[in-house]
Each structure stands twice: as C-alpha cells, then as structure tokens.
Image (cartoon, rainbow, N blue to C red):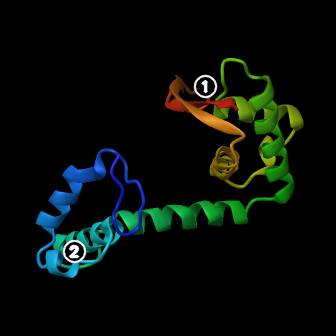
Amino acid sequence: MATCRYCYAQPAIWLWPRIYTKLLALATGAPQAAKGKCHTWLFQYVMFTISTTAGGNMEHPNLFDAIAERDAAINSVEGNTDSNWLRAANMAVEWLAKSAVNGFTSDDVWAQLETYGMTGQVHDNRALGPVILRCARNNLIMDTGQYRPSKRRHCAPIKVWRGI
C-alpha cells in the first residue's frame, strides 16, 4: 500500500492514488500550493473550497465541520448524564461483552439496565451512544458488521456488537 511521502501515513486503499489525483484536479490553484504538502492538507483544502463555493457561504458544512459537531454532541450528552447511570451502562456493556455468545445490541443493554433498575434515570436515551463508543474505542467490544431489528424502535436496524 502506498504511503504519503510527506507525513508517511497510509491512507485508506480507496484514497490512493485515484482520489488524490481527483483532489488535485478539483483544487484550482492547489497544485502549486500543494508542493511539499501531504494528502491530508490537500483533502482539507478541497473540502473547504467545495463548502465555501457550494452555496457561496458556510451554510453547507463540510466533512470536518460535521465530525466536530458530532463529537461536540456526544460530549454534551455524556457530560449531562448522571455519573451513576454511566457507570451502570458501562457495567451492562461489559457484562454483555463477556456473556453474549451471539453478540448483543443496544436493546440488550437497555434490557440489562432495566434489571439494574436504571432505565428511568437517564434524561436522554442517546446517552447510551457515548458509553458504547467508549467501550469500542477501548477494545472491549467490536462491531460485527451485522444488524438486527430493534425491539424498542419499530424494528429499525441496529448494530450487533460482540466482546473482544
């Protein structure tokens, strides 16, 4: 796999080299400015150019704005959640990671929280998202790539997780 010759990162296989050349073509005036810059700089330059010219203003956020807003929302929900509930949710995910042979979903975590008597003590049901993401980032659980219909949300497809 090719690496960026400036930052030595290994971009995703689909990014190199096809997307890099398309980014160069999209970036007017960027080829001269891109000399000595890495692929990340070029991608940010093109995304900023596209976002500022798409509507003539910043009302159309780019990918980096969306990521920042997502992270801010996750931090906000987690910061406004009771610490006792967060500990109970973390315990539920850890228990399911060790005991669920066929994987588990967020519905299973809610069912486990119900056995703890903690389901009515959360201000926002989205508070479970940061708990699951933190467990995934800490390599406690991993995404199986499978989905199951939710029992709580009108059969909406939800991720299946399994313990590592």
Q: Nearer the viewer, mark 1 or mark 2?
A: 2
> Where is 32 relative to 88, above or below?
below
Q: Quadrant of the N terminus?
A: top left
Q: Residue at x 65, y 35 (%)?
A: 106
- Left or right of 7: which side holds 81? right
Badge 1 or badge 2: first in the primary sequence: 2
Q: Compare residues 130 and 7 and report the one nearer the observer.
A: 7
Question: How many residues crowd mark 2 within 10 Å: few (<14), some (14–19), many (20+)?
Answer: some
Compared to 124, does 40 lie above or below?
A: below
Q: Mark 2 falls on what kind of element?
A: helix
Q: Which residue is mark 2?
A: 49
Quarter residue 24 falls in: bottom left
Residue 139: give x, y in percent of width and height: 68, 43
Q: Position of residue 86 (x, y in %)?
A: 79, 52
Instruction: Judge by depth and name the residue closer to the eye, 155 or 91.
Output: 91
Q: Amino acid at mark 1?
A: Lys
State which quadrant residue 77 falls in: bottom right
Tag 1 residue = 151
Left or right of 58 in this view: 23: left
User: What percent of the width, then of the height, locates residue 97?
Assistant: 75, 31
Q: Are marks 1 and 2 in contact (CB under 8 Å)?
A: no
Quadrant showing the C terminus: top right
Q: Quadrant of residue 163?
A: top right
* Residue kind at label 2, given as amino acid type: Thr
* Direction from residue 86 to residue 139 in the image, left or right: left
Residue at 29%, 66% in the rendered image: 43
